[in-house]
Image (cartoon, rainbow, N blue to C red):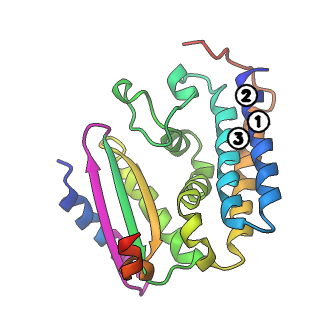
Amino acid sequence: MGARNWHAARATHHKRVADHLEPTFPDWAAVALFYSAMHLVHSSLADEPGVSKDERHPRKHSAKAGEEHGGRGTNQMVRDLYPEIHEQYRSLCEMSHRTRYDMDQLGPQAYPLLVRQWKDVRAFCEGRNQGRPTIPTQAP
Amino acid sequence: MVSTENLKFELAGRLAELDLQTKDHISVRWEPAPAIVRVGLMIGEYTWENRMAVLAMLLDFERDHSDDFALEFDIVPLAPTQTDEFAEA
């Protein structure tokens, strides 16, 4: 299993966790939903041509460009390479920090809106992955 | 030259342009070594629409400074941060 498929499988797993939690614990479901989105993004970054190994496999959520920072973080890779889903992805990321405290205040529509953002991320990443050659994980 | 005060001033201006008609408070932490700016943006009327408007503003702010730093942020309802319970948590 290559990196793309591994991340895609993790994305599916985390979405199943989110679906399981949502009826009773939508705040924690939002955390799993974000990590599903993160793995969807990583499934696409893993085979992104013209990108260094460190940036195809980001180890941080946020990092400025540059070797001294280990390459851009996932947030900055989405900003620069996938602007179509940048807002949705950062919304999911932000809510995964805040959900334990604040999501209740946004009302019952908040979780469905987050799911809509997750679906945008999924559609974009799955489209990006279609028919694209894989890049070996250790390639520079 | 990045400084906490400069960043806070710029963010206050960008927030005012959104004209959210709500109280707000901004906290900024600048970490020069990893080149990360951490922003806490508290808004009085914490709704999905206001949250997304602030989020879009913060993403524009980060994009405009992408040569200088990466941004991490929280968008927080203002009221709970002003209680004793929050201060002691």
Q: Which residue is mark 3?
A: A40
Q: Which residue is mark 2?
A: A4
Question: Relative to A19, does residue A48 appear above or below in the rendering?
Answer: above
Quarter of image, res A42:
top right
Q: Which residue is mark 1?
A: A8
Q: Earlier in the sequence, mark 2 or mark 3?
A: 2
Marks 2 and 1 close (CB-CB < 8 Å): yes
- Kind of residue indicated by mark 1: Ala
Q: Residues in magenta?
A: B13-34
Report the Cα–Cα distance between label 1 and label 3.
6 Å
Residue at horizontal 37%, vertical 30%? A69
> Is there any visible trace of residue A52 in the rendered image?
no
Mark 1: few/some/many CA within 10 Å (<14, 14-19, 20+): many
Position of B88 compared to A134: left or right?
Answer: left
Residue A47: x %, y % from top left: 67, 25
Position of A16 compared to B86: left or right?
Answer: right
Pointer 2 chain: A
Residue A100: x %, y % from top left: 58, 65
Residue at horizontal 41%, vertical 86%? B22
- Kind of residue indicated by mark 2: Arg
Q: Earlier in the sequence, mark 1 or mark 3?
A: 1
Q: Quadrant of the N terminus of chain A?
A: top right
